Amino acid sequence: MPNHTASYDLPPSYHLPDLLAELPWPRLLSEHYEEVRVESDAWIESFNPFNEKGRDAFRACDFTLLSALTYSPREKIIIRLGADLMNLFFTFDEYTDIQDHAGAIALRDIVDDAFHNPDKPRPEREVCLGAIAKDFWNRARAIVPRNAPCLRHFLKDWEGFSRNVVQEAEDRANNRYRGFFDYLKVRRHTSGSYPTLALCEFGLDLPEEVYHHPMFVVLRDQAAELIALINDVYSLAMERSRGLNWHNAVMLVMREQNASLPEAMDWILNYGRRVVRSFNANVDALPSWGPDVDRRVQIYIQGIAQNIRGVDDWTFESHRYFGPKGLEIKMTRTMSPFPPTRGFAKLDDDEDHVSVSISPASYVTQIQPANLIAAV
């Protein structure tokens, strides 16, 4: 058990490392941002997923901005699907964060059922996640051929995400505190990175031999790892304010290595730099599949890299983690703790829980570690 003493308290201010200093892809914002923001905000709010206080806070997060930064080179239809996916992700995240293990399983089963049975009417009085997932997935299916591999890839990646969200809820319920690398096996999925990266493939019709090439498997794993670490470094103050103390890479490094917060940040910075360098080397070492496929591969690579860069940019430009001071914090790299707070989920009248139907589920198995060594 970790030692819950003042030694783990956040200091009055601390430094945020820049893990992406050596990533060569720059900030890029889609020209479709403003138009998609109006459409996607109206779409998610039509499901009324948040309480009155949470609605304004959720708007300030601006998840369309996240999509417009991460899918920035792509056409409007991908930007819109990306924005809706981000809204689904964070709604699911907000709801499961306040659930126990059984509640998280129930929410996962609702969304999984909507994805696998998109023509099925959703039950009355079901939590809104089912209807949100159904609508998103029906529009995503409509832009590619019925048997397109990207559909299978997305569903597989979503299942990995939702399965590990349940694993995280089980860890919380059982007061399980993982080591850094064991934690990353789960965190790469709970960050939502893999389904987000899967959307980069839509409309490109990549051959299966390209998608499953070992180099691309490693690139996706490395991107997911960087996105997870970026999120944990920047979300530390918010997660501590919600009491999610021990499901964050920074806190786990502090505990595992008996390190101070600055020492843990430096360790993660050095680790992240090695992953970035390996990612860059892997991109340079990709083979050729001929001019036509290589053109689509370059779009796909840019999509993966832009997802890494876009998450970093969005963190400072939205109000999700830093409120209105994001750009100032980006300049100074100096952060301060938040007072205790709650999430945005729409609660029952007693404001204590989200109402869902609980169903039995099997034990969640642990995923295997990814190979993060440059496969040159």
Image: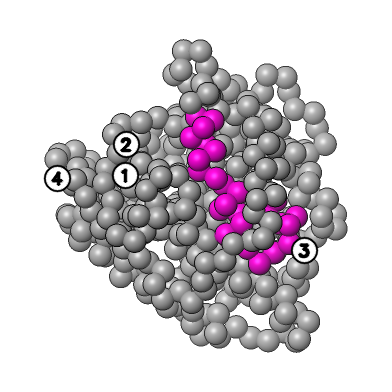
Range of residues picked out in magenta: 54-80
Observer-nearest of 355 and 62: 62
In percent of the image, x 57 and y 52: which residue is there?
65
Judging by the rendered image, the residue that carries numbered circle 1 is: 237
For the residues marked 3 and 2, what is the alpha-carbon distance in whole angstroms? 41 Å
Judging by the rendered image, the residue that carries numbered circle 2 is: 241
Q: Which amino acid type is shown beneath numbered disc 2? A: Ser
For the residues marked 1 and 3, what is the alpha-carbon distance in whole angstroms? 38 Å
Please state the horizontal and vertical placement of residue 112, each as a whole percent of the image.
66, 39
| Residues at marks 2 and 4 touching, judged by CB atoms closer than 8 Å | no
Please state the horizontal and vertical placement of residue 174, each as a whole percent of the image.
35, 34
For the residues marked 4 and 1, what is the alpha-carbon distance in whole angstroms? 15 Å
In percent of the image, x 52 and y 73: which residue is there?
25
For the residues marked 2 and 4, what is the alpha-carbon distance in whole angstroms? 16 Å
**Residue, far top:** 350
**Residue, far left:** 6
**Residue 59 painted magenta:** yes
Indicate whether 344 appears above or below 32: above
Please state the horizontal and vertical placement of residue 309, each as a whole percent of the image.
50, 65
Judging by the rendered image, the residue that carries numbered circle 3 is: 203
Q: Nearer the viewer, mark 4 or mark 1?
A: 1
Q: Earlier in the sequence, mark 4 or mark 3?
A: 4
Task: Determine whether the residue tagged by mark 4 lies in a helix, strand or loop.
Answer: helix
Please state the horizontal and vertical placement of residue 367, each as a whole percent of the image.
50, 54
| Residues at marks 1 and 2 touching, judged by CB atoms closer than 8 Å | yes
Q: Main secondary structure of the magenta part?
A: helix
**Residue 156 painted magenta:** no
